[in-house]
Every structure is written in C-alpha cells, then in structure tokens.
Image (spheres, rainbow, N blue to C red):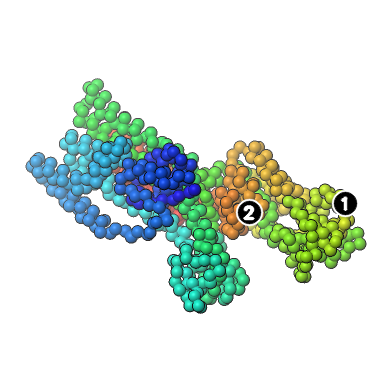
C-alpha cells in the first residue's frame, strides 16, 4: 500500500535527502521518496503503523520542527503573518544593535551588543544546531553556520560573524520565497480542480465539494465554471475550454449525450451533467496525481547529487580542519589567519544550491509539460527522453488518424456487395476495434445479434462466427490462410477479407488518413539524429505506402500484438541508447511497458494505457512527442547550468579562501547567493514558449 504525507515546515533540501536515505532503511519499507518541491513523503509498506512512527522519529531527529501530516488529514494552511512580523521586528532590533556595535569604541559594550545582536539574528540557527548535535546530526547547515560564526567571534571578528549570519538569514529567506513562488507557479499551471459543484436536489442547485459527488448525481455547470468530475451531458448545449487538459485551444462543442472531462471550463451555455465517475477516479484527479507523484521517480542526476552531497560536506569540513591546523603548525602564518580561512570553508561546505535547484528544475519541466497536455511520470523519463536514439511508432491512430471508413467493397465467387458487407457487419458488431466500428457504420442497418452464434475472436487476426447457420470468417490474410481460404495476396491498403462456408465472399478496403503533422515530426526527429521505426499489423503494401509518404526507412508489417513485443525487443538489442515506443494505447500496453520510454497518445480515458505508459499525451497530436523531447532537453540544460554554476563558484571561493584572497561575505554568496540564483534559473523553464 502507498501512503502520502505532507512534511510541514520542511525547508532544508539537504536534510530532506538525509531523511529519505534513513526512511528507506526502515524494515518493511518497500519504497520511500521525499519530494522537496512539494514537501511530500511517499511510503510503500504493508505495516504502516510502525513504519510511519519510525519515519516520524527519523524526521524529528533531523529537523525537530518538521511535522509529518497524513495527506488525508491535511487542510490548507494560511500563512502565519504574525510570526513573520515578529521575526522581522526581531531581526530589525538585531541590525540596530549591530550598527551600534560597529560605531562603539568601548570594547566591552562592543562585545555585549555584538552578542545580543548575534542571538537575535541567528539564535534559532544556534538552537537548531545544538538540538541536532544532541541527536547526532552534525554535518548540516545549522551546525556549519554556527561553528563558522562562533569561530569568527573567538578570533575577534565580531562584525564579520554577525554580518555573515545576517546575510545567511536574508539569503535563506529570499531562497525560501523563490522556492515557494516556484511551487505556486507550478501549481498554477495545474489549476484544474473545481472549488465546488452545483448538485441538483429537487431541481435546486446546492454547492458541495467535488469529493462529495456520487455516480448518477446530476450537477449544473454554469458559464465560466469548471466541470468538477467526469460525466455526460443530459441537458443543454455549450462549448468547453479543454486547453488545460489537452493543450488544445479550439473550443470543444458538447450537447446531450456527449462525454465531458473534469477540469474543462464551460464557456457559454448552462449544461446539466450526469456524474459517471467519482472525483477520485476523474480525469483531473488522475492528472494531478500523476504530476505530483512524478517527483518520486527521480532522475540519475538527482540521485547522483544526493550521494555527492552526502560526501561533499564532510570532505570540505575535513579540509577546513586541516587548513586551520597544518599551515600554522608548519610555520606558514598565524593560527588566527588560517582559522579564518578554514571558517570560510565551513560556510561554503553546504550543498544546498544543488540539492534544492536540481529537483526544482525537473519538477518545473514536468509542470510545463503538463500544461501542454504532456503528462510525464518522473524526472527519470525526462532524462531518458534526452538520450533517445530510436523512436518506434505504431501506425494506426498514431501516425494516421485512426478514423477508418470503408472505401470499397469487392465481392467474389457469386456474392454481391450487400452480402459481403452484411456478413462482415454482423460479425464485427461484437468488436469495438475502430475498423470493426467503421464496417458496422457503413452497413447502417439494424443488426439482430441473436442471429450470430459461436463467436470466437483470434487476437490480432479477426473473428469467426456462425451467422444465420453459416460459418463466417472476417479478418486478415493470415486468418484466411489458417482456415484454408484462398485469397489474393497482392492487395494495397488495409483489407478485411470475408469468407462464408470456406469460400472467399470478397474483401472490404478500409482507408485511413495520415496525420497532417506526422511527416514534419519524423523529419524533426531525424534532424536530432533520432532514428524512426514503424510497426503495423497491416499488409506490406499498406505499410510501404505510409512509410514512403513519411520518409520512414525502417518498418515492419503484418505484426500481431505479440509479434510487436518481439520485434521491439529486437530493436532495443540493436540500439545503443534509449528506445521509445509511441502508440495510441489500444492493445499497446505490453510494448509500452518494455520500452525505455513508453508514450501513449490520446490516452486520457484509457486506464490500461495510463498505467503502462511513462508519458501520457492527452490528445492525439503527434507533434507533442517532439515537444516533450524539446522540453526535456531544455530542462536538462538548466539542470547542468545549475550544477556548473554551484560547483564552479564554490570551488573558486574555496581556492581563494585557501590563498587568503576571499572573505566570509563571499563565502555566504557562494552558499545562499548561488542557491538563490540556481532557484531563479530553474524558474526560467516555466517561461519558455515553443
């Protein structure tokens, strides 16, 4: 079972990484992940009571002020403005005393004012450090800042000790504000949930929460309101804005009998909607869950940074100690001089800039993609998209529109067109495959299903049944051959053969249309040095025709669902790099699961496809595949900019400190200043426009 908790008061990214590592080690924990951006802990376990208690103890031992609250019990909290106001007054008094201390010439007064100012500005940091030392948590930012500033006090650098603590606190506050603003920006991208629903009781609307609605309830949706749950229109005519779900800007027309998705905005008329899914199973909840849980699937870069942070701080602290002892011991300068340089090392030793900005960058990328109708299930798939070598496309419904229609009927052996179409329609009426639907639609007459008996479906090949006492076989070339029916093999297009009592009655030619943007997408992928492959169950001529028009050199035809899995595995073995599979979600689940990146298109209402896919494109626009790759590449670019910025500035300050060419103010910038810059840089992802 999966359990989710909100970590109230979590503000230290490095501490979050430590919490996650220790929670993963709890006996009985199958999976654990902390999403610092959303302050969320996810635990998978069969023994939630003991595991949650132990997890809470671990969290308290690392950050005593952090509260672990079950998501189910969480109510939206208002900002505690009074607390912020009192802190502001406290810091202001501290700054005033600091200024008095600077201009005072009396050393005793200077020391007293310096100490009081220090406690007012950084007392909470010192207190946290002492609590953590008692719990055995030494290498955290509170400890490092306390030791560094205390050290400055001991060597008589009072102004430096206070100013470093002051700028650290200002930097931390600005950093927290920037992270919170980023969180809000990402959440604003996903403002899909309706605040209320108008439930009709005795034809009178009553405001209720979307969670309170039940199947078969009828709700009233007025112009400008969001649809709270999935349903079907039972009265009224209107247009819906579905852009937040699908990225599609054109209004979607609805009338009686049309399905509507939660998260859509009613643009004009008043409609009555019958609830078909409770809120927990509705489209909007699934999208929000997919995006919010995406942070649990971490990229290799995130995991590397977490491991790097675990060793970076102790190593720099160790170097700091050696720097304070060895040079003066060997006669190079005074202890005071080298202790000061060592204190700079301590200030720079916190890896916060990396630990905060990397997950924030990935989550920003996921948030932006979601706004564009591309649901990415984790930052690991963002990285996987960046390293794609091959994209394998299913043909029908992916490269083509998948909207079939009967273009011709060719009767044979004494049968007429009406006979061929009737027999095919009667058998295909039991299938929901798009080709079957097109045949039934072409027939257009009432079908008495009681006349059909002994129906048998042959996966990927067709159907066999007895219609009005006659054995009828409807399907592809392979099915005809298996049943000893002689057929013409060299036929172009998608062909459905119809045999009656073992004799070929004729065949139906089905046409499909290539999507307008398919060719441009294939060309764009090839420019990125990504190979393209097409898989289809259609015959050779049909596959050849589509591949030729799109410029796809590698294609495989006549494939059953199990053949597609085998062929895809073969392509993976032959490819040095990641291989993605793109399908419409119908019968694609097995291939989606085994691919490095499984992309399901237009799969918003298909549970199996959403479950199997790593990326869900909410509409059927194939250009979203290319857009997802672009967003991923830009996100990774920002991630590496932040890594290079943070490490290069820290290394530069460390070198300058060792040479005696930098001071503690510069060290504070290398810590919180760079963290702030990295967070602001991460926010650029939310502003890109394709």
Q: Residue at x 59, y 67 (%)?
A: 259
Q: Who is closer to the viewer here, 68 or 575?
A: 68
Q: Residue at x 23, y 31 (%)?
A: 339
Q: Position of residue 609 (x, y in %)?
A: 60, 53
Give the left or right position of residue 68, taking residue 506 as reference. Answer: left
Asked if marks 2 and 1 touch (Cβ < 8 Å), the reply is no
Q: Who is closer to the viewer here, 357 or 336?
A: 357
Give the left or right position of residue 664, taking residue 616 as reference. Answer: left
Cα separation between marks 2 and 1: 33 Å
Give the left or right position of residue 398, taking residue 544 as reference. Answer: left
Q: Residue at x 79, y 62 (%)?
A: 452
Mark 2 / mark 1, whichever is N-terminal: 1
Secondary structure, mark 2, is loop
- The label on residue 486 is 1
Would you call the spot at circle 2 few (<14 residues within 10 Å), some (14-19), or many (20 or more)? many
Q: Residue at x 61, y 69 (%)?
A: 258
Where 543 falls versus 278 (above or below)? above
Q: Mark 2 — residue?
A: 585
């Amino acid at each position: 079972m999966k359990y989710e908790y909100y970590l109230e008061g979590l503000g230290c990214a490095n501490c979050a990484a430590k919490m996650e590592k220790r929670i993963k080690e709890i006996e009985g924990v199958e999976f654990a992940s902390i999403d610092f951006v959303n302050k969320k802990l996810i635990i998978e376990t069969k023994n939630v009571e003991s595991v949650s208690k132990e997890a809470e103890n671990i969290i308290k031992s690392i950050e005593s002020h952090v509260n672990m609250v079950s998501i189910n019990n969480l109510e939206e909290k208002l900002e505690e403005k009074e607390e912020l106001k009192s802190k502001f007054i406290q810091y202001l008094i501290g700054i005033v005393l600091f200024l008095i201390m600077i201009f005072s010439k009396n050393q005793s007064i200077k020391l007293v004012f310096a100490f009081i100012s220090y406690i007012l500005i950084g007392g909470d940091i010192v207190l946290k450090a002492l609590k953590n030392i008692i719990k055995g948590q030494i290498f955290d930012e509170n400890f490092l800042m306390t030791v560094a500033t205390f050290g400055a006090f001991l060597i008589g650098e009072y102004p430096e000790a206070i100013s470093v603590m002051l700028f650290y606190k200002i930097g931390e506050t600005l950093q927290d504000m920037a992270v919170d603003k980023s969180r809000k920006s990402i959440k604003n991208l996903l403002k899909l949930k309706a605040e209320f629903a108008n439930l009709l009781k005795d034809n009178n609307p009553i405001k209720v929460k979307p969670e309170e609605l039940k199947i078969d309830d009828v709700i009233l949706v007025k112009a400008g309101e969001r649809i709270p749950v999935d349903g079907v229109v039972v009265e009224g005519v209107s247009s819906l804005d579905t852009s937040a779900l699908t990225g599609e800007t054109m209004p979607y027309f609805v009338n009686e009998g049309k399905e509507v998705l939660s998260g859509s905005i009613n643009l004009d008329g008043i409609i009555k909607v019958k609830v078909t899914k409770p809120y927990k199973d509705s489209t909007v909840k699934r999208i929000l869950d997919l995006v919010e849980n995406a942070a649990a699937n971490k990229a290799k870069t995130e995991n590397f940074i977490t491991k790097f942070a675990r060793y970076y701080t102790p190593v720099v602290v160790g170097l700091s100690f050696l720097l304070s002892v060895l040079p003066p011991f060997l006669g190079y300068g005074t202890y005071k001089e080298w202790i000061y340089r060592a204190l700079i090392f301590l200030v720079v030793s916190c890896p916060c800039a990396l630990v905060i900005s990397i997950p924030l960058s990935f989550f920003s990328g996921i948030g932006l993609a979601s706004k564009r109708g591309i649901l990415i299930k984790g930052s690991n798939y963002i990285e996987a998209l960046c390293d794609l070598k091959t994209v394998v496309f299913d043909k029908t419904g992916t490269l083509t529109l998948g909207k079939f229609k009967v273009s011709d009927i060719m009767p044979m052996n004494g049968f007429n067109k009406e006979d061929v179409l009737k027999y095919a329609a009667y058998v295909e009426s039991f299938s929901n495959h798009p080709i079957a639907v097109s045949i039934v639609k072409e027939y257009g007459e009432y079908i008495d299903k009681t006349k059909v008996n002994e129906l048998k479906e042959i996966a990927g090949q067709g159907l066999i049944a007895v219609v009005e006492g006659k054995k009828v076989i409807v399907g592809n070339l392979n099915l005809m051959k298996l049943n000893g029916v002689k057929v013409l093999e060299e036929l172009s297009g998608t062909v459905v053969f119809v045999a009656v009592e073992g004799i070929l009655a004729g065949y139906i030619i089905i046409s499909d249309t290539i999507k307008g943007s398919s060719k441009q997408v294939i060309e764009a992928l090839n420019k990125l040095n990504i190979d393209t492959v097409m898989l289809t169950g259609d015959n050779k001529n049909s596959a050849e025709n589509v591949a030729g028009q799109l410029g796809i050199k590698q294609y495989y035809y006549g494939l059953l669902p199990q053949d597609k899995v085998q062929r895809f595995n073969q392509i993976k073995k032959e490819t040095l790099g990641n291989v993605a599979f793109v399908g419409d979600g119908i019968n694609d689940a097995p291939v989606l699961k085994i691919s490095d990146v499984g992309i399901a298109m237009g799969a918003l209402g298909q549970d199996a496809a959403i479950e199997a896919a790593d990326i869900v494109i909410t509409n059927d626009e194939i250009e979203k595949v290319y857009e997802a790759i672009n967003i991923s590449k830009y996100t990774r670019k920002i991630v590496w900019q932040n890594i290079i910025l943070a490490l290069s500035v820290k290394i530069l300050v460390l070198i300058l400190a060792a040479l005696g060419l930098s001071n503690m103010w510069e060290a504070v910038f290398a810590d919180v200043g760079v963290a702030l810059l990295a967070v602001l840089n991460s926010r650029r992802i939310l502003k890109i426009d394709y």
